[in-house]
Image: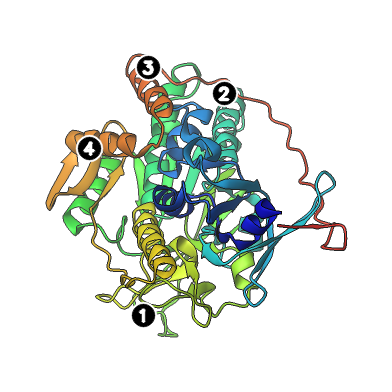
Amino acid sequence: MKKTQLARNKKKIVILGGGFAGVKCTRKLESEFGNNSEIELIMISEDNFLLFTPMLPQVASGMIETRHIVMPIRTICKKTKFYEGRIKNIDPHGKLVNLWGTADKRSISIHYDFLVVALGSETNFFGMADVEKNAYTMKTLNDAVLLRNRIIDMLEQAENETNPILRKSFLSFVVAGGGFAGIETAGELMDLLLDARKHYHTIRKEDLRVIVIEALPMILPGFNEKLAGFAKEKMTDRKIDIRLKTAITSFDGNEVTTKFLVQNPKDPIVEPIIDVIRTKTLIWTAGVTPVNTIKRSLFKTDKGKVIVNDYLEVQDFPGVFAIGDCAMFLNPETKRPFPPTAQIAEAQALIAAKNLIALIKNSEKEKFEYHSKGQMAIIGKRSGIATFLGMNISGFWAWLIWRNVYLSKIPTLDKKIRVFLDWTIDLFFDRDISRLKLMKREDGKEYKLLDEVDDVW
């Protein structure tokens, strides 16, 4: 009886999402409440691992082994009860989180006293259905594996293709987006192509084309202009074609249609310049949008993101916090939302955790103020750019700093060692060009709605 009473009196903190923000917040709460019998920590995530997304391009290029950038959540959040499942909806009035059921498991409803929403984002195709259907993305581990298979498949087909037009389309790869993900993907892609080309005797170096399409006038927005210019120059030297002020309007699986963005789009006299790129492979990294669970929730949103106050608390719902890509928090200097980066997500996670602790202990909450620790990007061939400790660094040293910083951020020692060994092996050997045949199994049908047999936790 006493155990049942204690379980009922426990304060439940539920964290939604197992990304950088969710894991960082959970680990901070574990350090405070991990041994507190009156507080129960619960995490819900679709995957049972933390994906180290900054290294996805290196998985796609075959530099790093797939499983080396995933950290099982149960091994890094050991004092938290974990549920693997998809969130159907959030009921902030009843303080319930409802999970979908499938053919293999019942749907359940989990009660909370405090809630942290850290559900991240998904790829934004800006309403272009043909692009969504035909493009490759770089958001998940599966995306990276599929892209690597695609690149090798294109090389295999091009090696023995006699039609020059078709062959050129096989060897042309278009990357949409000139941000961190797009630039790092393009650099790694070129590294893989140049390594693999040695084993394809009919493919010459000049046959390979990597094209980056960016709507803004510069790549890597937010970086120092000189550093961004250095990155563009280095990548151009490596024969990566970077097209600025250009937007993709369609992709049917065979051709990418682009539109040059004129200086004054309201001028009816100026006709936009339309171009067509023959390619079989478009890699889309051009934007993200909050997940549908957020968009259809009862929380007040702006552009799909949950509106939060200075303490990262959700309007009208005390004790509910939103952090990371799914939270709408404006940069006080630019009056624009912060970019969707892991660094910002983790900074918000720490403040949300501190404010949760303050609520439970009846102490003063802390406002979120972001102070950048610097920015880094690698551009391929052991080169990169970095703003670090107030210094602007480019070339080999920036690449080295990138490696050391991100290696230090991997949460577990075994994964640090595995990634380091992968990098070391890459110094001496070419990339593996085996194409893995993967059979995709359809997701379980989300048909089992909440009913009287469902569990309430």
**Residue 425 disc label:** 3
Identify the residue position indicated by label 2 in the image.
Answer: 159
Mark sitting earlier along the chain (4/2): 2
Q: Position of residue 323 (x, y in %)?
A: 45, 64
Identify the residue position indicated by label 1 in the image.
Answer: 264
- Asked if labels 2 and 3 touch by Cβ distance under 8 angstroms, the answer is no
Residue drawn where x is 82% and y is 63% of the image: 450
Looking at the picture, tell me which residue is in the foreground, 447 or 122: 447
Q: Position of residue 59 (x, y in %)?
A: 48, 33
Q: Position of residue 68 (x, y in %)?
A: 48, 29
Instruction: Establish if 236 lies above or below 22.
Output: above
- Kind of residue at badge 3: Ile
* Element assignment for label 3: helix
Q: Is residue 127 visible?
A: no
Q: Nearer the viewer, mark 3 or mark 1?
A: 3
Q: Rounded to the nearest whole Å, what is the CA distance between mark 3 and mark 2?
A: 27 Å
Q: Rounded to the nearest whole Å, what is the CA distance between mark 2 and mark 1?
A: 44 Å
Q: Is residue 361 visible?
A: yes
- Kind of residue at badge 2: Glu
Mark sitting earlier along the chain (4/1): 1
**Residue 161 disc label:** none
- Asked if labels 4 and 3 touch by Cβ distance under 8 angstroms, the answer is no
Instruction: Establish if 170 lies above or below 424.
Output: below
Tell whether 232 sits left or right of 342. left
Q: Seen from this angle, which residue lies furthest front?
A: 2
Mark sitting earlier along the chain (3/4): 4
Q: Nearer the viewer, mark 4 or mark 2?
A: 4
Q: Residues within 10 Å of mark 1 (few under 14, many from 20)?
A: few
Identify the residue position indicated by label 4 in the image.
Answer: 401
* Element assignment for label 4: helix
